Image (cartoon, rainbow, N blue to C red):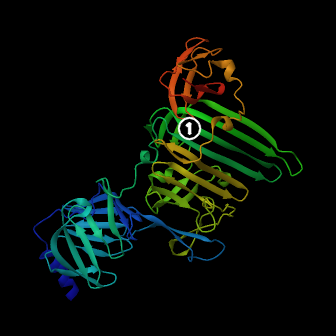
Amino acid sequence: MRKLLLLCCALSCGVLSAQNWALINPDYKYNYSNDGTDTISNQVFVTHVDTLGVDSFRYELNRIALVCDTCGSGNYSVFIRLDEPQFLGGQVTRSQGVWHLQSGVSYVLIPEASDGTTWLMDTLNSVWATMGPTLVGTPFDALEERRAIQLSTGDSVVIGRDHGILRWPTGHQLIGINGLGVGTTIPEFADFFPYTAGDIVEYSKAYGECVYMDGCHGYSVDYKYTFDTDGIPQDSAVLYSGWMTGHTVGYSQMDAGSPIIYQHGYLNEEATWHAGVQELPWPELLFSYPGQLVRNTHRVSPDDSPAWCVSEHGMDGANRYTIGCRKLKGGYFLFDQYPQPAQDGYLEYYEPVDFCPGGALPDCGVRYSAGIGLEWFIANFVERSERYILNGAVLGGDTIGTITPDDILLGVKDQDMAGQRIFPNPASDHLQLSSVPPGTVCSILNTTGQVLLKHTTFSPAERIDVSSLTPGLYILKMAGIGPLRFVIAR
């Protein structure tokens, strides 16, 4: 009875006349860290709003998937609890200035209570709260009224009038708000692919499988893309125009005694490139929040079944924001055809056989870094494997990793054809082309692959002005013709 009277007193008598303490704004996504760093461990936001009455609402909050290594029993070894509430619970009811956090927790917060008001805050564990005075702080470099709620456990909750819950007793600190644009925020999709004209990315990708009685087959691709233009945002992708140079090798082997048949293919032409959906694996992660269960279908999946992984957010050694997921326990993928009901609300998944390589790269998983894009994707399932790895890039003139010269990538050892196509070589202020079809797009690149000049031919014998280029070695690219080296000397 005493607890009930105190709670009623807090609700009816202890509310300040000042209003607008919005602990959770449905328009924002609140980013928290639980380790004192700038790494976002949790993002909390409203997914659905129900109007219960005048100044009374129910907010549904986003939930996460939790991996449990000690749950369940039987033949299954990966356990995931789906739709789990986060540290603030899964549902919030706001009514007349009182906030009740529910679903997995049961907390009562009264942000407008008078200084010294006491109420039962944690109804499950009998934790009492006492409201502190209103002070002025500077979260995110802005003045804001804030209050500390002292708990009977010795801990406290800190709230702000404009930024909501600033600190929670579980060690969670608010470090940023998406939508309000303050503090540490999860980058937008385009922030992972801010490529501009002159940038270069080079990737190696491969897929292979061995099927009983059918032997083994697969392919590998090394390609380099030079951006001629800035990106154009599309639905779940950024589209670029530029020049693609690459080498593809396909193979098949019927049995151990049969020779492997290689099929070589070379690519050297203008092309469009999609950063994201259509080209890169697991781009769905770039729209995820920490702990979200992300679904994707990729070639390594058995029978093309959708695969799942739990999104992880972090920072790399260069302080770039990263999003990816590792293998779950002993295996990387969780597949739709394997989930089995388990006790206590868990889902059990059969553990894929793990043949992931070790070494310098992580043994399995995928990671994207802001400003770079995809860094690596490695996955294996029984006798299938797939990888997609960034070899190197030239971004804003800075080189990351290794960029392969065009002549090596295209298998061209000598440039004897140059003398048959362009002259003089060395050149001074112009190049003369011969036997080139009208309408051919010519691109002149430096030795790092940056496009410096473009020209469209109007006749088989075309003259290109190169007087603006400094002395040095250059590469001329034309669709359907291998790269041609030439020198400018004055």
Which residue is drawn at the image coordinates 34% and 60% (left, top)? 45
The quadrant in which the C terminus is found is top right
Which element carries disc 1, helix, strand or loop? Answer: loop
**In this rendering, is residue 267 above or below 403?**
above
Does the rendering let one see residue 409? yes
Does the rendering let one see residue 1? no
Which residue is drawn at the image coordinates 27% and 85% (left, top)? 152
The quadrant in which the N terminus is found is bottom left
Which residue is drawn at the image coordinates 45% and 40% (left, top)? 235
Q: How many marks?
A: 1
In the rendered image, the residue lying farthest to the left is 17
Tell me where residue 245 appears, x and y as whole percent. 62, 35
Residue 154 figure quarter: bottom left
Left or right? Give the position of 16 relative to 222: left
**475 vs 19, nearest the viewer:** 475
The residue to which callout 1 is attached is: 448
Tell me where residue 360 appears, x and y as whole percent. 62, 60
Tell me where residue 127 appears, x and y as whole percent. 29, 83
Left or right? Give the position of 8 relative to 191: left
**In this rendering, is residue 279 above or below 443?**
below
Tell me where residue 421 appears, x and y as whole percent. 66, 19
Under mark 1, the amino acid is Thr
Residue 226 figure quarter: top right
Which residue is drawn at the image coordinates 50% and 48% (left, top)? 373
In the rendered image, the residue lying farthest to the right is 257
**25 vs 97, nearest the viewer:** 25
**In this rendering, is residue 334 above or below 251?**
below
Left or right? Give the position of 213 relative to 387: right
